Image: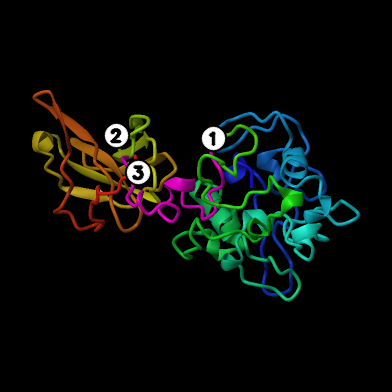
């Protein structure tokens, strides 16, 4: 929905247990208390919300940004007449194009293409992309009820697939987002001065940096392009190395390429560590006396290994074409950085 809520807004962590319509998280909080989504994202009505994605502080509350800014005070889009409890996946239904549309939060934070359907709650299961966004960020509790929370088990609809409410924009809700790719100059998913829209498919590639939104930007960029990789921990006994790095744009995961220090001048790689995630931090083991690089990929194409300087000229580091543990070929043709 709003820019900062890509990671931080209405965490649609609810779905079905069997087919009886019971949800794990059917409300933002259980009883206006510090539970469910609120335990991480705070009181929905508190002014000065801070985005979990980009750290931006909103001048507004989550509630008012949604109600006033986006929905023109059409409360029934998310509420029933009684106002509380507020459910993540059902409501009375608003006015204009929203009449009969009773999806509440999942109308913007989920896609019907990811849903399981339900005899009692139509929007049940819509939020697989948002659950995967949380899973990749280390919040994995959703998988206890929803197998589709783990990206390894379920492929969700791509970024450019419309959430249900995005297809219902009308004059009475003129500020409602209508394009999940959030293109310039309108940036329709930006609401409170944040720097990102919603990661609708949860793969870590935001808006036009997602290849589903911009085919030209079809290959991932360099890991560490915006901030250098740093070694933040090393266990001499186990050989475990902990690093922080900036994930590459358009990437869904990261591999490690390593080789002996003696082979560093020619980048003589000797092995790989596959799929360390795309969160910006990772712990892995490499042989002692090794150099290593973190390299982003999108599952089918690998990004840049970075550049090296020789004789005053900057050139691309060579790819690892020999190792076979992580067989993702490099493609720099349409890199997004």
Residue bearing the label numbered 1: 195
**Residue at 24% from the left image edge and 58% from the top image edge:** 327
Circle count:
3
Dominant secondary-structure state across the stretch colored magenta:
loop
Place of residue 158 in the rendered image (x, y in percent of width and height, measured from the top left): 48, 60
Determine which quarter of the picture holds residue 115: bottom right
Which segment is the magenta one? 196-222
In the shown orientation, is residue 337 left or right of residue 42?
left
Query: Are the residues flagged by discs 2 and 3 in contact, CB closer than 8 Å?
Result: no
The crowding category of the residue bearing disc 3, from other C-alpha atoms within 10 Å (few below 14, some 14 to 19, many at least 20), is many
The outermost residue toward the right is 82
Look at the image and tell me whether residue 170 can be seen: yes
- Say how the picture is coloured: rainbow
- Of residues 87 and 163, which is closer to you in this image? 163
Residue bearing the label numbered 2: 236
Q: Is residue 207 magenta?
A: yes
How far apart marks 3 and 1 lie (CA) works out to 17 Å
Q: Secondary structure at mark 3?
A: loop
**Residue at 53% from the left image edge and 60% from the top image edge:** 161
Q: Which of marks 1 and 2 precedes in the sequence?
A: 1
How far apart marks 2 and 1 lie (CA) works out to 40 Å
Look at the image and tell me whether residue 205 can be seen: no
Residue bearing the label numbered 3: 336
Place of residue 294 in the rendered image (x, y in percent of width and height, measured from the top left): 29, 41
In the shown orientation, is residue 303 left or right of residue 316?
right
In the shown orientation, is residue 146 left or right of residue 101?
left
Place of residue 152 in the rendered image (x, y in percent of width and height, measured from the top left): 44, 61
């Amino acid at each position: 929905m709003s820019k900062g809520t890509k990671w931080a807004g209405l965490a649609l962590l609810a779905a079905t247990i069997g087919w009886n319509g019971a949800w794990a998280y059917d409300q933002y909080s259980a009883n206006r208390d510090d539970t469910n989504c609120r335990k991480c994202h705070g009181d929905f009505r508190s002014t000065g919300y801070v985005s979990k994605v980009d750290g931006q502080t909103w001048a507004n509350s989550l509630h008012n940004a949604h109600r006033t800014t986006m929905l023109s005070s059409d409360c029934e889009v998310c509420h029933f007449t009684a106002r509380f409890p507020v459910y993540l996946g059902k409501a009375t239904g608003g006015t204009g194009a929203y009449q009969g549309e009773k999806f509440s939060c999942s109308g913007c934070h989920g896609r019907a293409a990811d849903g399981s359907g339900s005899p009692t709650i139509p929007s049940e299961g819509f939020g697989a992309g948002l659950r995967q966004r949380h899973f990749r960020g280390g919040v994995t509790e959703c998988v206890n009820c929803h197998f589709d929370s783990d990206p390894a088990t379920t492929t969700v609809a791509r970024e450019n697939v419309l959430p249900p409410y995005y297809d219902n924009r009308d004059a009475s809700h003129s500020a409602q987002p209508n394009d999940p790719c959030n293109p310039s100059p309108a940036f329709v998913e930006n609401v409170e001065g944040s720097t990102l829209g919603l990661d609708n498919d949860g793969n870590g590639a935001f808006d036009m940096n997602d290849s589903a939104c911009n085919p030209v930007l079809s290959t991932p960029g360099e890991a560490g392009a915006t901030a250098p990789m740093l070694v933040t921990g090393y266990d001499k006994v186990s050989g475990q190395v902990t690093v922080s790095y900036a994930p590459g744009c358009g990437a869904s995961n990261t591999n490690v390429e390593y080789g002996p220090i003696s082979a560093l001048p020619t980048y003589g790689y000797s092995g790989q560590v596959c799929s360390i995630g795309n969160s910006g931090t990772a712990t892995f083991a490499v042989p002692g006396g090794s150099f290593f690089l973190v390299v982003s990929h999108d599952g089918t194409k690998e990004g840049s290994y970075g550049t090296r300087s020789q004789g005053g000229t900057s050139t691309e580091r060579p790819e690892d074409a020999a190792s076979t543990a992580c067989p993702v070929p490099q493609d720099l043709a349409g890199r997004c950085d």
